[in-house]
Image (spheres, rainbow, N blue to C red):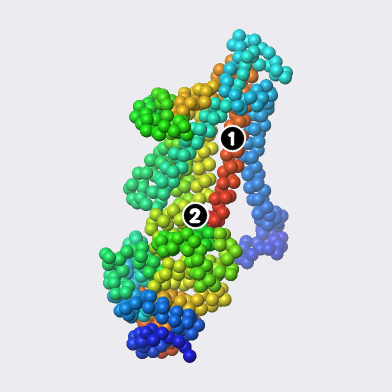
Amino acid sequence: MPFISPRYRDRVDRDDRTVGPGIEVTSGPGRSEVDLVLEAMDPDGVRPAEAIAARNLSLCFADKHIVSEVSVGFPRGTITALIGPTGCGKSTFLRTLNRMNDRVPGFARQGDVVLDGESIWAPSQDLLNLRRRVGMVFQRPNPFPMSIRDNVVAGVRAHRIAKGKQLDVVAEERLRQVGLWDAVKDRLGDSPFRLSGGQQQLLCLARALAVGPEVLLLDEPTSSLDPISTELVEELLRSLTPALTLILVTHNLGQARRTSQHTMFLYQGRLVEHGPTQDLFERPKDPDTLHYVTGRIG
Amino acid sequence: MDLAGTAPTGVSPVGARPARRPHLRRIRSLARAHEHHLWVAGGRAAALVPLVALALTMVVLAWKAWPAARVNGLHFLVASTWKPGSTYGAVTRTDGVAHPVGASYGAWPVIAGTLESSLIAIVIAVPVSIGAAFALTERLGGWLAGVLRTAIEILAGVPSVIIGLWGALTLGPLLANDVYPVIARNMPDLPALRFFKGPVGHGEGLATSGIVLALMIIPIIASTTRTLFAQVPALPKEGGEALGMTDWEVSRRITMPWVRAGIVGAAVLGLARALGETIAVAMVSGSLLNTVAPNLYGTMGTIAATLVTQLDSAFVDGTGFEVRTLAELAVVLVVVLLLVNTAARLIVRRAGGIAAPVGTGA
Ligand SMILES: Nc1ncnc2c1ncn2[C@@H]1O[C@H](COP(=O)(O)OP(=O)(O)OP(=O)(O)O)[C@@H](O)[C@H]1O
Ligand SMILES: [Mg+2]
């Protein structure tokens, strides 16, 4: 009997009329834990159902339109897959969501991105805190030049979430969460560059999780990993919901189907189709989507 | 043309001109097959050239210096005397080595002066260079970066004799009038800080030498460091940014550690240059041979400056002993440089413990 927190189920039902495939929270934390997480995230139950949403968002690099008028919401506690052929603007879109593009020369935007109902460019938004709330994992692992333990707690330190001995606790907790603890517990002080690529990526995931984000942006996080590591990461991502809202860019359509509840298909900068993953893959409404998911474009 | 004679050699690729001279071809293909070995052998030979040159220099120096070393003994490294001895040609022999009566050499003041002035130079130059390199690659944009870069490049190209002259005529007096007195006056009166107090002199001395040396090595360290910073891949820096680190935290925790080993190397390059710098120091140090500077501002000398200022008078010594002593001094300098290099290598190895191995992590 799959367990879904009542409040969570309400929201999913209301938004989508269907509980998408892959919402198998049974493998996740137990009932009370989920409730704790959700309550901590939203004590009064007043937060918008969409953790983050793009409103009419258009993005340009030096007058070249990369993304045009995308409006899409990401329901809290779900995984949304972002698919589309190379160069269609997936990374550009994703990086805009935690303002990583703001300082890129030539970058311009129209429209808005709202996080919990508030524009991420609102003057009251603190950029550093925004990035704490909206974390990011990159295509290739990018450990910092410091020990494995310090990598995990780098963000925790920067945001002064914990200090001293607490850092060790945080490091262990997050390494356990990503399943890396047993592999590295005897060499926490070692260089992360001697870990395998997959282990490095897990380390980066642990690092991103350590600051307690609400939304996690993942840009092809498994593209440099072997199938077994990929499967581990996918399982881990599924276990992160419903505490977190995930947006997963992937070229691996199987991965999109296996992990996500919703899928959005971006093609030449336009949001061609967006809907429950199963529908999009099995009953695509748009001919371009059909072509892409059956492997004829991209 | 005798086409019948061009038997296929078996290696001619499709469409290639048929080989006319099988022998030449065979030699060519042999050369191609062994090209790699030729390159390796050539590379090894080329790599040996500096080693051989260094070894030859050392042998010649040591050969020259050995008799003086026997007479001067260990005393040479610790004593503070520089006496060429009898100027009337009275000669005596110690251990069979001829030298003027009363000649006595102890190079401790110039050894200390070399180390002290280079230390001052490196202490000033490393932070300034890192700051400049950092500003160039990470912070400043547009024309400001251009101005700073040009300034550094120009500084790198100024001949040391010009810097020395400027140091002696302008910078030294300026410092002695307006800067040193302020430091000496405001330094707390503690025994440990006595070195910073006392008479400030007229601008020739240890502090001025150190500052002039710093000016000369800043371009070296800054340009090397700038290259290092520019090579740090964007991905880890973006990772820090995406985690909510400030620019400063990204710099301090990611960019700097990434190139730490390289920065130590750049500093050593600068230090080696400072230890060996000659003419500018000769012009601003005061060229004192037999006294260690009593405080930060006192006149002093360095090994390299002594070599150039004493060579002329050394040739007056008919026994050649003073020239041999200068050769001994040169050996000391080379040994100091080698020690510094070795120490630096050890530091680099330790500093590189966690830093990204070169060429990875991008
Ligand atoms: N900094 C930039 N300046 C100018 N153009 C850029 C910049 N970054 C990306 N682009 C352009 O924007 C377009 C979309 O790039 P983006 O990286 O978002 O594609 P993508 O969908 O992530 O592709 P992939 O699947 O290959 O990662 C490309 O045409 C790219 O050339
Ligand atoms: Mg991309």
- Marking on residue B336: 1
First in sequence: mark 1 vs mark 2: 2
Few, some or many residues within 10 Å of mark 2 (<14, 14–19, 20+): many
- Marking on residue B328: none
Q: Nearer the viewer, residue B215 or B175?
A: B175
Q: Looking at the image, which residue is at 39% across and 86% down?
A: A6
Residue B51 picture quarter: top right
Going by the numbered disc 1, the residue's amino acid type is Val
Distance between mark 1 and mark 2 Cα atoms: 29 Å
* SS at badge 2: helix
Whole-percent x and y of residue B276? 53, 33
Whole-percent x and y of residue A61? 34, 65
Q: Nearer the viewer, residue B248 or B62?
A: B248
Going by the numbered disc 2, the residue's amino acid type is Trp
Residue labelled with disc 2: B258
Whole-percent x and y of residue A215? 39, 73
Which quarter of the figure is the N terminus of chain B placed in? bottom right
Residue B250, compared with residue B144, is above or below; it is below
Q: Looking at the image, which residue is at 39% across and 44% down?
A: B149
Q: Looking at the image, which residue is at 53% across and 42% down?
A: B268
Whether residue A124 can be seen here: yes
